[in-house]
Amino acid sequence: MDLKILLELIRDPRIQIAELSETLGIARNTAQSRIKRLLRSGVLQAAGREVDLEKVGYDVVAFVTIEVTHRELDGVIGALRLIPQVLEVHEISGRGDLWCRVVATDTHNLQSALRAVLRTKGVIRTETVLALHTHIPYRTEPLIGRMAAAPTRGKSEGQSAGAAAQAD
């Protein structure tokens, strides 16, 4: 049931509890308590609605690989957190140490963000690649839909979405 709730929330993030419970054929209190549990467990993020950044002027997207001095890694991550254009930071294997998704209003705004990255203590070098077009945006519906449609294989109805995901 948790996976079905997640799938409906992905399909319509603004769905009301009453509509969700009716769609899934469960009581309102059940839907409400399961959503609260999904939020508490971190499976469902309370961050809010997705915003199309391109439509509000951030139409330059870049992927930045950063090589850092390892003893400065935590400080670099903390500094990146303060740069508004940095949307994501991932510690990676392979070339470089960190991978960032950065957005900007234009190339001058991007250059400003990249200079802020390069001025950060512990940053050795960066490599930036511009995104020309997004063919498949970030998505979760295919994964959650597949899991929700899978046979339960003996899973209890009350099993959490996180545990169900690990079992799959």
Image (cartoon, rainbow, N blue to C red):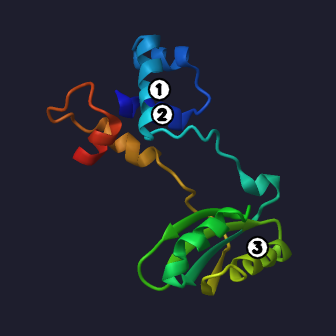
Mark 3 to mark 1 CA distance (whole Å): 37 Å
Within 10 angstroms of label 2, few (less than 14), some, or many (20 or more) residues? Answer: few
Could you tell me which residue is drawn at 50 percent across and 80 percent down?
A: 71
What amino acid type is highlighted by mark number 1? Lys
Could you tell me which residue is drawn at 40 percent across and 16 percent down?
A: 30
Within 10 angstroms of label 3, few (less than 14), some, or many (20 or more) residues? Answer: many
Where residue 141 sits: x, y (%)? 46, 44
Mark 2 to mark 1 CA distance (whole Å): 5 Å
Q: 106 left or right of 119?
A: right
What amino acid type is highlighted by mark number 2? Leu
- Farthest-out residue, front: 71
Residue linked to disc 3: 113
Q: Quadrant of the N terminus?
A: top left
The answer to whether the residues at label 2 and label 3 have Cβ atoms under 8 Å apart is no
Q: Quadrant of residue 43?
A: top left
Residue linked to disc 1: 36
Where residue 53 sits: x, y (%)? 73, 54
Q: Quadrant of residue 58?
A: bottom right
Q: 145 left or right of 107?
A: left
Mark 2 to mark 3 CA distance (whole Å): 33 Å
Q: Secondary structure at mark 2?
A: helix
Among the two numbered marks 3 and 1 on one chain, the one whose residue lies closer to the N terminus: 1
What amino acid type is highlighted by mark number 3? Ala
Where residue 101 sits: x, y (%)? 62, 67
Q: Quadrant of residue 163?
A: top left
In this view, 26 is above or below 162? above
The answer to whether the residues at label 2 and label 1 have Cβ atoms under 8 Å apart is yes
Judge whether residue 82 can be spotted in this image. yes
Q: Secondary structure at mark 1?
A: helix
